[in-house]
Image (tube, rainbow, N blue to C red):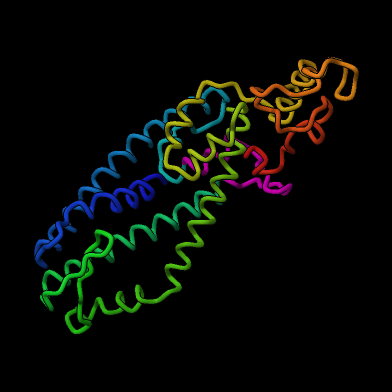
Amino acid sequence: MEFSAWLEVLILFIVPSYFADEVTREEAIAGTYTGYFIAIGIAVGLWLIFQVLMGFGIYTIAKRAGIKRPWMGFIPFANTYYLGTITGEARFFGQKMKRAGLYAAIAEGIAVLFTVFDLVCNLVFLQVASLNPVAEDIELFAGFNELTIALADVPVNLRWLCAFTASVWPWTFKFLVAVVRIVMLYVLFLAFFRKYYARNPAVMTVLSAVLPFRGATIFAVRKNTPVDYGEYTRRRMEAYAARNYPYGPGGSGTSSAQQPRQDDPFSDYPSGGGSSSQGGPPPDDPFSDL
């Protein structure tokens, strides 16, 4: 879900901009509140824009393919699962993955819950700091304010929150969930773009799984005709071999024919026009396109 990614980046850049070299405690709290809510507003706006683009993209693809319930493309989390239905079977290091969309949607949901929980914790602690003034000392580190909050100033019903956030394991789990989320989305989108953008699926996958631009990428390929990636790669390698090695890779052709052209995008692949195992990346390797 793109909202989490946009929110974390916007908080990183917007919140520090509300601090001068010297600020009072009240100004630091007010500036932090302002920065957080501006970041939330912008993140929501960007998320809605990309969700609409993604919805129309999935809807168009599903309608063209005759898949039922294309309106699911407009529902958050459900559209990730539905994208797996459109894509079909994915592969992860040779292992078939029939429910890549479901796994990606679950990991995405857990990651968003952690992001929201982190945001709520920060806003709660700011509220506690504003209601219970303590020492005037404020340290500004890397643009962020660090407010000293005594445990005695925290309401009893919120002290569990302090103990929970002070622990290491919740944020370790959050990091692991983020890694799993990226991997699952990468597998899902790589299978999708190998089908709907075989020319360069790796770049589109990074923009969709790692960076928060999936709405734009899916919308851009909504009218593309699905292809068999293995067959597509084989034909491209055969065309490359016929163009650059007219006498065979070990034949008596000219020196220019024996060397791949510098502007050829497949020059890093081994020569030959046989099967994809000899002339192109194996279709079940999720990282071969990189």
Query: In the figure, 17 relative to 290: above or below?
Result: below
Classify residue 55 by image quadrant.
top left
Q: Is residue 178 magenta?
A: no
Please state the total of marks drawn on the protein image: 0
Residue, x 81% and y 19% (percent of image)?
A: 255
Residue, x 78% and y 32% (percent of image)?
A: 270
Q: Is residue 99 magenta?
A: yes
Q: Taking 243 as reference, is 196 left or right?
A: left
| Residue extent of the magenta highlight | 79-100
Quarter of the image where the C terminus is located: top right
Q: Position of residue 92 (x, y in %)?
A: 67, 48
Q: Position of residue 47 (x, y in %)?
A: 34, 41
Q: In front: 61, or 15?
A: 15
Outermost residue toward the bottom in this view: 152
Q: Taking 282 as reference, is 18 left or right?
A: left
Q: In front: 19, or 155?
A: 19
Q: In front: 250, or 158?
A: 250
Residue, x 28% and y 66% (percent of image)?
A: 121
Residue, x 16% and y 57% (percent of image)?
A: 19
Q: Position of residue 226 (x, y in %)?
A: 62, 25
Classify residue 283 by image quadrant.
top right
Q: In front: 50, or 28?
A: 28
Q: Position of residue 218 (x, y in %)?
A: 48, 31
